[in-house]
Image (cartoon, rainbow, N blue to C red):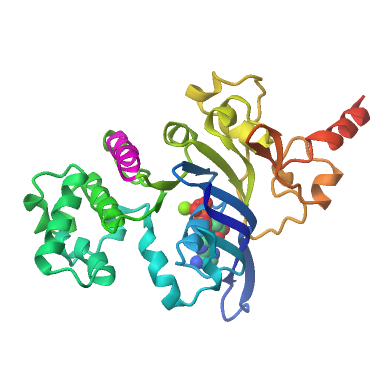
Protein backbone atom coordinates (compact mmCIF):
# COMPACT_ATOMS: atom_id res chain seq x y z
CA UNK A 1 0.00 0.00 0.00
CA UNK A 2 1.41 3.37 -0.94
CA UNK A 3 1.22 6.39 1.34
CA UNK A 4 2.79 8.85 -1.11
CA UNK A 5 2.65 8.63 -4.88
CA UNK A 6 4.45 11.27 -6.89
CA UNK A 7 3.62 11.59 -10.59
CA UNK A 8 5.63 13.56 -13.14
CA UNK A 9 6.69 16.01 -10.45
CA UNK A 10 8.61 18.94 -11.92
CA UNK A 11 10.25 22.02 -10.41
CA UNK A 12 12.16 24.50 -12.53
CA UNK A 13 13.84 27.38 -10.72
CA UNK A 14 14.97 30.51 -12.51
CA UNK A 15 18.48 31.54 -11.52
CA UNK A 16 19.53 35.10 -12.27
CA UNK A 17 23.13 35.54 -13.39
CA UNK A 18 25.32 38.43 -14.52
CA UNK A 19 25.12 42.07 -13.41
CA UNK A 20 23.40 45.24 -14.48
CA UNK A 21 26.32 46.37 -16.69
CA UNK A 22 26.70 43.13 -18.62
CA UNK A 23 22.99 42.45 -18.56
CA UNK A 24 21.17 39.94 -16.42
CA UNK A 25 20.50 36.48 -17.73
CA UNK A 26 17.78 34.21 -16.49
CA UNK A 27 18.90 30.60 -16.44
CA UNK A 28 16.41 27.79 -15.81
CA UNK A 29 17.48 25.13 -13.30
CA UNK A 30 15.74 21.79 -13.74
CA UNK A 31 15.87 20.70 -10.10
CA UNK A 32 13.14 18.04 -10.36
CA UNK A 33 12.18 16.72 -13.76
CA UNK A 34 9.06 14.57 -14.31
CA UNK A 35 9.89 12.46 -11.27
CA UNK A 36 7.79 9.39 -10.42
CA UNK A 37 8.01 7.80 -6.99
CA UNK A 38 6.05 5.78 -4.46
CA UNK A 39 6.58 5.62 -0.70
CA UNK A 40 4.94 2.53 0.80
CA UNK A 41 3.19 2.62 4.16
CA UNK A 42 5.56 1.69 7.00
CA UNK A 43 8.80 1.69 5.01
CA UNK A 44 11.92 3.82 5.10
CA UNK A 45 12.61 4.86 1.54
CA UNK A 46 16.11 6.21 0.95
CA UNK A 47 16.75 8.92 -1.62
CA UNK A 48 20.37 8.89 -2.62
CA UNK A 49 22.38 10.97 -5.06
CA UNK A 50 25.14 13.55 -5.28
CA UNK A 51 24.73 17.12 -4.16
CA UNK A 52 22.59 19.12 -6.60
CA UNK A 53 20.59 16.20 -7.99
CA UNK A 54 17.30 17.49 -6.52
CA UNK A 55 16.79 15.54 -3.27
CA UNK A 56 15.96 18.51 -1.04
CA UNK A 57 13.71 20.09 -3.65
CA UNK A 58 11.75 16.83 -3.95
CA UNK A 59 11.29 16.76 -0.17
CA UNK A 60 10.27 20.41 0.00
CA UNK A 61 7.72 19.88 -2.78
CA UNK A 62 6.16 16.91 -0.97
CA UNK A 63 6.08 18.93 2.28
CA UNK A 64 4.41 21.82 0.39
CA UNK A 65 7.27 24.19 1.31
CA UNK A 66 7.78 24.73 -2.40
CA UNK A 67 5.20 25.07 -5.20
CA UNK A 68 5.60 22.59 -8.05
CA UNK A 69 5.97 23.68 -11.67
CA UNK A 70 3.91 20.64 -12.71
CA UNK A 71 2.91 17.20 -11.51
CA UNK A 72 0.95 15.45 -8.78
CA UNK A 73 1.66 14.43 -5.17
CA UNK A 74 -0.87 11.99 -3.77
CA UNK A 75 -1.02 11.50 0.00
CA UNK A 76 -3.34 8.66 0.95
CA UNK A 77 -4.98 9.13 -2.43
CA UNK A 78 -5.49 12.92 -2.17
CA UNK A 79 -3.61 15.14 -4.65
CA UNK A 80 -1.97 17.77 -2.41
CA UNK A 81 -1.17 19.97 -5.40
CA UNK A 82 -4.87 20.61 -5.95
CA UNK A 83 -5.60 21.74 -2.37
CA UNK A 84 -5.92 25.31 -1.16
CA UNK A 85 -3.66 26.40 1.74
CA UNK A 86 -6.58 26.01 4.11
CA UNK A 87 -7.37 22.51 2.90
CA UNK A 88 -3.68 21.56 3.10
CA UNK A 89 -3.55 22.50 6.81
CA UNK A 90 -4.72 19.06 8.05
CA UNK A 91 -2.13 17.31 5.89
CA UNK A 92 0.67 19.52 7.22
CA UNK A 93 0.09 17.97 10.62
CA UNK A 94 0.55 14.48 9.20
CA UNK A 95 3.75 15.23 7.28
CA UNK A 96 6.85 16.60 8.96
CA UNK A 97 10.44 17.30 7.95
CA UNK A 98 13.74 17.05 9.81
CA UNK A 99 16.20 19.44 8.21
CA UNK A 100 19.88 19.02 7.51
CA UNK A 101 21.22 21.83 9.66
CA UNK A 102 20.22 21.81 13.33
CA UNK A 103 22.03 25.15 13.80
CA UNK A 104 19.75 26.77 11.26
CA UNK A 105 16.41 25.06 11.85
CA UNK A 106 15.78 26.03 15.50
CA UNK A 107 14.90 29.64 16.33
CA UNK A 108 17.84 30.89 18.46
CA UNK A 109 15.66 33.33 20.40
CA UNK A 110 13.22 30.73 21.67
CA UNK A 111 13.49 28.28 24.57
CA UNK A 112 13.17 24.56 23.77
CA UNK A 113 9.78 24.58 25.54
CA UNK A 114 8.45 27.26 23.20
CA UNK A 115 10.01 25.65 20.11
CA UNK A 116 8.21 22.40 20.87
CA UNK A 117 4.97 24.13 21.83
CA UNK A 118 4.72 25.89 18.49
CA UNK A 119 3.33 22.91 16.51
CA UNK A 120 0.82 22.24 19.32
CA UNK A 121 -0.28 25.88 19.29
CA UNK A 122 -0.87 25.66 15.55
CA UNK A 123 -2.61 22.30 15.39
CA UNK A 124 -3.93 21.43 18.85
CA UNK A 125 -5.19 24.79 20.07
CA UNK A 126 -7.82 23.22 22.31
CA UNK A 127 -5.21 21.76 24.69
CA UNK A 128 -4.52 23.60 27.98
CA UNK A 129 -1.04 24.99 28.65
CA UNK A 130 -0.39 22.25 31.20
CA UNK A 131 -1.43 19.52 28.77
CA UNK A 132 0.85 20.96 26.10
CA UNK A 133 3.73 21.16 28.55
CA UNK A 134 3.24 17.49 29.39
CA UNK A 135 3.36 16.62 25.70
CA UNK A 136 6.57 18.65 25.35
CA UNK A 137 8.15 16.84 28.32
CA UNK A 138 7.19 13.45 26.87
CA UNK A 139 8.58 14.44 23.47
CA UNK A 140 11.89 15.52 25.03
CA UNK A 141 12.20 12.24 26.94
CA UNK A 142 11.34 10.23 23.81
CA UNK A 143 14.50 11.55 22.16
CA UNK A 144 16.57 10.46 25.18
CA UNK A 145 17.20 13.87 26.71
CA UNK A 146 16.41 13.23 30.36
CA UNK A 147 15.13 14.62 32.61
CA UNK A 148 13.08 16.83 30.30
CA UNK A 149 12.99 19.66 32.90
CA UNK A 150 16.76 20.09 32.41
CA UNK A 151 16.32 20.88 28.73
CA UNK A 152 12.99 22.73 28.48
CA UNK A 153 14.20 26.11 29.62
CA UNK A 154 17.43 26.15 27.66
CA UNK A 155 18.05 28.01 24.39
CA UNK A 156 19.40 26.19 21.31
CA UNK A 157 22.90 27.67 21.77
CA UNK A 158 23.09 25.92 25.13
CA UNK A 159 22.83 22.52 23.42
CA UNK A 160 25.34 20.49 21.38
CA UNK A 161 24.74 19.81 17.66
CA UNK A 162 23.51 16.29 18.38
CA UNK A 163 21.14 17.53 21.10
CA UNK A 164 19.77 20.21 18.77
CA UNK A 165 19.08 17.64 16.08
CA UNK A 166 17.27 15.54 18.70
CA UNK A 167 15.09 18.57 19.52
CA UNK A 168 14.39 19.03 15.80
CA UNK A 169 13.32 15.37 15.69
CA UNK A 170 11.06 15.88 18.73
CA UNK A 171 9.49 18.90 17.04
CA UNK A 172 8.81 16.85 13.90
CA UNK A 173 7.22 14.03 15.91
CA UNK A 174 5.25 15.89 18.58
CA UNK A 175 2.07 15.93 16.47
CA UNK A 176 2.26 12.17 15.81
CA UNK A 177 2.67 12.49 12.04
CA UNK A 178 2.30 9.48 9.76
CA UNK A 179 5.04 10.59 7.34
CA UNK A 180 8.44 12.10 8.10
CA UNK A 181 11.19 13.25 5.74
CA UNK A 182 14.70 13.35 7.20
CA UNK A 183 16.94 15.40 4.90
CA UNK A 184 20.56 14.39 5.56
CA UNK A 185 19.88 14.60 9.31
CA UNK A 186 23.41 13.66 10.38
CA UNK A 187 25.59 15.24 7.70
CA UNK A 188 26.30 18.41 9.74
CA UNK A 189 27.02 16.50 12.96
CA UNK A 190 30.22 15.12 14.48
CA UNK A 191 30.88 11.55 13.41
CA UNK A 192 30.76 10.50 17.07
CA UNK A 193 27.08 11.40 17.49
CA UNK A 194 25.80 10.27 14.09
CA UNK A 195 25.11 6.60 14.92
CA UNK A 196 23.11 7.67 18.00
CA UNK A 197 20.81 9.84 15.90
CA UNK A 198 20.35 7.16 13.21
CA UNK A 199 19.46 4.52 15.81
CA UNK A 200 17.08 6.93 17.51
CA UNK A 201 15.30 7.49 14.19
CA UNK A 202 15.05 3.73 13.62
CA UNK A 203 13.59 3.21 17.13
CA UNK A 204 11.10 6.06 16.82
CA UNK A 205 10.05 4.88 13.38
CA UNK A 206 9.35 1.40 14.75
CA UNK A 207 7.57 2.57 17.91
CA UNK A 208 5.39 5.15 16.19
CA UNK A 209 4.63 3.15 13.04
CA UNK A 210 6.01 5.95 10.86
CA UNK A 211 6.59 5.98 7.15
CA UNK A 212 9.85 7.74 6.37
CA UNK A 213 11.80 9.23 3.51
CA UNK A 214 15.48 9.31 4.36
CA UNK A 215 17.64 11.56 2.20
CA UNK A 216 21.39 11.11 2.08
CA UNK A 217 24.36 11.35 -0.27
CA UNK A 218 25.97 8.47 1.64
CA UNK A 219 25.12 4.99 0.40
CA UNK A 220 26.45 3.27 3.56
CA UNK A 221 24.03 5.25 5.72
CA UNK A 222 21.20 4.53 3.28
CA UNK A 223 21.93 0.82 3.35
CA UNK A 224 21.87 0.86 7.17
CA UNK A 225 18.61 2.79 7.43
CA UNK A 226 16.41 1.96 4.47
CA UNK A 227 14.08 -0.81 3.30
CA UNK A 228 14.25 0.46 -0.27
CA UNK A 229 16.58 2.87 -2.00
CA UNK A 230 15.77 5.27 -4.83
CA UNK A 231 18.77 6.61 -6.74
CA UNK A 232 18.28 10.12 -8.02
CA UNK A 233 20.13 11.84 -10.81
CA UNK A 234 19.36 15.29 -12.26
CA UNK A 235 15.83 15.43 -10.99
CA UNK A 236 14.80 11.89 -11.89
CA UNK A 237 14.81 8.48 -10.24
CA UNK A 238 17.17 6.29 -12.26
CA UNK A 239 16.92 3.13 -10.14
CA UNK A 240 14.74 2.00 -7.24
CA UNK A 241 14.46 -1.27 -5.39
CA UNK A 242 14.91 -3.17 -2.12
CA UNK A 243 18.18 -2.11 -0.43
CA UNK A 244 19.88 -5.50 -0.78
CA UNK A 245 19.17 -5.65 -4.50
CA UNK A 246 20.49 -2.13 -5.06
CA UNK A 247 23.71 -2.89 -3.17
CA UNK A 248 24.35 -6.37 -4.58
CA UNK A 249 23.07 -5.92 -8.07
CA UNK A 250 23.16 -2.22 -8.99
CA UNK A 251 22.01 -1.97 -12.58
CA UNK A 252 22.16 1.68 -13.61
CA UNK A 253 25.70 2.86 -14.47
CA UNK A 254 25.29 5.71 -11.96
CA UNK A 255 24.31 3.36 -9.14
CA UNK A 256 27.19 1.06 -10.07
CA UNK A 257 29.59 3.97 -9.72
CA UNK A 258 28.10 4.97 -6.35
CA UNK A 259 28.41 1.42 -4.96
CA UNK A 260 31.89 0.88 -6.39
CA UNK A 261 33.42 3.74 -4.38
CA UNK A 262 32.11 2.56 -0.98
CA UNK A 263 34.59 -0.02 0.33
CA UNK A 264 32.31 -1.62 2.92
CA UNK A 265 29.56 -2.11 0.32
CA UNK A 266 31.34 -3.08 -2.89
CA UNK A 267 32.42 -6.41 -1.35
CA UNK A 268 28.77 -7.53 -1.75
CA UNK A 269 28.66 -6.79 -5.47
CA UNK A 270 27.64 -9.78 -7.56
CA UNK A 271 29.48 -8.43 -10.59
CA UNK A 272 32.46 -6.15 -10.13
CA UNK A 273 32.89 -3.40 -12.65
CA UNK A 274 35.17 -0.40 -12.28
CA UNK A 275 33.36 2.82 -12.93
CA UNK A 276 34.73 6.17 -11.92
CA UNK A 277 32.57 9.27 -11.79
CA UNK A 278 34.07 12.57 -12.74
CA UNK A 279 32.47 15.95 -13.28
CA UNK A 280 29.44 17.01 -11.31
CA UNK A 281 25.69 17.39 -11.59
CA UNK A 282 24.66 20.48 -13.54
CA UNK A 283 20.92 20.97 -13.21
CA UNK A 284 20.94 23.98 -15.55
CA UNK A 285 21.64 21.76 -18.57
CA UNK A 286 18.39 20.22 -19.79
CA UNK A 287 18.59 16.55 -20.71
CA UNK A 288 16.39 15.62 -23.61
CA UNK A 289 17.40 11.98 -23.31
CA UNK A 290 18.88 10.13 -20.35
CA UNK A 291 19.91 12.56 -17.57
CA UNK A 292 23.13 10.58 -16.99
CA UNK A 293 24.17 10.33 -20.66
CA UNK A 294 26.84 13.04 -20.47
CA UNK A 295 28.80 11.14 -17.81
CA UNK A 296 27.95 7.59 -18.86
CA UNK A 297 30.68 5.32 -20.27
CA UNK A 298 28.03 3.31 -22.17
CA UNK A 299 26.38 6.30 -23.85
CA UNK A 300 25.04 5.79 -27.37
CA UNK A 301 22.70 7.64 -29.78
CA UNK A 302 19.44 6.51 -28.22
CA UNK A 303 20.53 7.86 -24.82
CA UNK A 304 20.72 11.41 -26.19
CA UNK A 305 17.35 11.27 -27.96
CA UNK A 306 14.91 9.51 -25.64
CA UNK A 307 14.54 9.58 -21.88
CA UNK A 308 14.54 5.95 -20.68
CA UNK A 309 11.60 4.91 -18.48
CA UNK A 310 11.76 2.95 -15.21
CA UNK A 311 11.27 -0.74 -16.02
CA UNK A 312 11.13 -3.71 -13.69
CA UNK A 313 14.25 -5.86 -14.25
CA UNK A 314 13.73 -8.26 -11.34
CA UNK A 315 11.07 -8.43 -8.65
CA UNK A 316 10.49 -4.91 -7.22
CA UNK A 317 13.72 -3.64 -8.81
CA UNK A 318 13.24 -0.88 -11.40
CA UNK A 319 15.90 0.65 -13.61
CA UNK A 320 15.76 3.49 -16.11
CA UNK A 321 18.48 2.80 -18.67
CA UNK A 322 18.50 2.15 -22.41
CA UNK A 323 21.15 -0.52 -21.90
CA UNK A 324 18.48 -2.89 -20.67
CA UNK A 325 16.79 -5.13 -23.25
CA UNK A 326 16.81 -4.44 -26.99
CA UNK A 327 19.16 -1.49 -27.00
CA UNK A 328 21.83 -3.50 -25.20
CA UNK A 329 21.67 -6.21 -27.84
CA UNK A 330 21.97 -3.60 -30.57
CA UNK A 331 24.96 -1.95 -28.82
CA UNK A 332 26.65 -5.32 -28.39
CA UNK A 333 26.01 -6.25 -32.00
CA UNK A 334 27.67 -3.03 -33.18
CA UNK A 335 30.74 -3.58 -31.03
CA UNK A 336 31.30 -7.12 -32.34
N1 LIG B 1 15.56 28.26 -4.45
C1 LIG B 1 16.34 27.89 -5.49
N2 LIG B 1 16.60 28.75 -6.49
C2 LIG B 1 17.38 28.39 -7.55
N3 LIG B 1 17.94 27.17 -7.68
C3 LIG B 1 17.73 26.27 -6.70
C4 LIG B 1 16.92 26.57 -5.56
N4 LIG B 1 16.87 25.48 -4.75
C5 LIG B 1 17.62 24.54 -5.37
N5 LIG B 1 18.13 25.01 -6.53
C6 LIG B 1 18.97 24.26 -7.49
O1 LIG B 1 18.28 23.06 -7.81
C7 LIG B 1 19.21 21.99 -7.96
C8 LIG B 1 18.83 20.88 -7.00
O2 LIG B 1 19.05 21.33 -5.65
P1 LIG B 1 18.69 20.48 -4.36
O3 LIG B 1 17.29 20.03 -4.45
O4 LIG B 1 19.07 21.30 -3.18
O5 LIG B 1 19.66 19.22 -4.51
P2 LIG B 1 20.27 18.23 -3.40
O6 LIG B 1 19.44 18.32 -2.17
O7 LIG B 1 20.21 16.88 -4.06
O8 LIG B 1 21.69 18.66 -3.18
C9 LIG B 1 20.59 22.58 -7.71
O9 LIG B 1 21.16 22.91 -8.97
C10 LIG B 1 20.29 23.83 -6.92
O10 LIG B 1 21.29 24.81 -7.11
MG1 LIG C 1 20.01 18.73 -0.16
The segment highlighted magenta reads 195-208
Above or below for 246 versus 169: above
Which residue sits at x=48%, y=36%?
A: 227
Determine the image quadrant of residue 193: top left
Which residue sits at x=58%, y=31%?
A: 246
The percent position of residue 220, horizontal first and vertical second, equals 46, 31
Determine the image quadrant of residue 68: bottom right
Which residue sits at x=26%, y=65%?
A: 119
Above or below for 273 versus 53: above
Which of the image's four quarters has the C terminus? top right
Relative placement, left or right, of 298 versus 260 is right
Above or below for 11 versus 39: below
**Residue toward you, 212 or 182:** 212
Q: How many marks?
A: 0
User: Is the magenta region chiefly helix, strand or loop?
Assistant: helix
Residue placed farthest to the bottom in the image?
20
Whether residue 130 is visible: yes
Relative placement, left or right, of 290 versus 71 is right
**Residue toward you, 10 or 134:** 134
The percent position of residue 139, horizontal first and vertical second, equals 20, 51
The percent position of residue 155, horizontal first and vertical second, equals 14, 59
Q: In the image, is residue 206 part of the stretch drawn in magenta?
A: yes
Which residue sits at x=92%, y=28%?
A: 333
The percent position of residue 261, horizontal first and vertical second, equals 55, 29
Q: In the image, is residue 323 part of the stretch drawn in magenta?
A: no
**Residue toward you, 283 or 64:** 64
**Residue toward you, 143 or 197:** 143
Whether residue 184 is visible: no
Relative placement, left or right, of 297 versus 58 is right
Amino acid sequence: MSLITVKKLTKTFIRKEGNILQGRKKIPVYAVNELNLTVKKGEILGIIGESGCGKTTTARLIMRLEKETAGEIHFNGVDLCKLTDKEAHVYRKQMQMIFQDPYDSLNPGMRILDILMEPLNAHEKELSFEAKKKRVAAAIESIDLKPAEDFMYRYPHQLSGGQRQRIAIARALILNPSFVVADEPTSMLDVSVRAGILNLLLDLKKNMGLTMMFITHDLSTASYMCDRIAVMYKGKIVEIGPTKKIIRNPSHPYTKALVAVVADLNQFLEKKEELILDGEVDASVYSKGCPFAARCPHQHDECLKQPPQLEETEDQHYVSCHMGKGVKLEAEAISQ
